[in-house]
Amino acid sequence: MPAYPELDLAEQRLLDLLATYWSSGKKITVLKAMQISSDASSTTVHRRLKTLRLKGMLELQMDEDDNRVKYINPTPLSCDYLSHLGKSVVAAASDVKSGQTQ
């Protein structure tokens, strides 16, 4: 298993929310991300965006027309992490269906 940075619960939830946008091909701005979480304040989300960026899990891209707008993009590390997580969920569900739970 590749080495991933340790993520706290808030970072995991935020990354999951961002992944729903990324997987559907939608762009998401920092401002929009600060508004999508129902269980965290915008300040908390902004702080977690910073820590995820420092951990290499996302990157920011400025809008070509308006430098005040920044889009949140996944990095290869976050794509690999989310892919690994998805495969783990599928494997666990398969084990449950076949009665191989521990």
Image: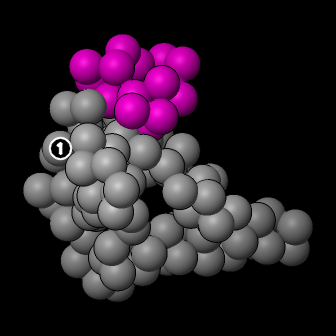
- The quarter holding residue 76 reads bottom left
Which of 87 and 45 lies nearest the eye of the viewer?
Answer: 45
Residue 64 position, x and y percent, is: 34, 63
Residue 56 visible in the displayed image:
yes
Residue 85 left/right relative to 58: right
Q: Is residue 58 visible?
A: no
Q: Is residue 59 left or right of residue 63?
A: left
Residue drawn at the location 17% of the way across and 44% of the way down: 50
Magenta-tinted stretch? 31-45
The colour scheme applied to this rendered structure is one colour
The image quadrant where one finds the C terminus is: bottom right
Viewer-nearest residue: 25 or 63:
63
Above/below status of 88 relative to 51: below
Residue topped by disc 1: 50
The amino acid type of the residue labelled 1 equals: Lys
Compared across the picture, whether 38 is left or right of 70 comes to: right
Magenta run includes residue 42: yes
Among all residues in the image, which is located at the extreme left? 54
Q: Is residue 62 above or below residue 83?
A: above
**Residue at point 39%, 67% (across, down):** 74
Q: Residue at x 24, y 50 (%)?
A: 67
Quadrant where the N terminus sits is bottom left
Q: Position of residue 39 (x, y in %)?
A: 48, 18
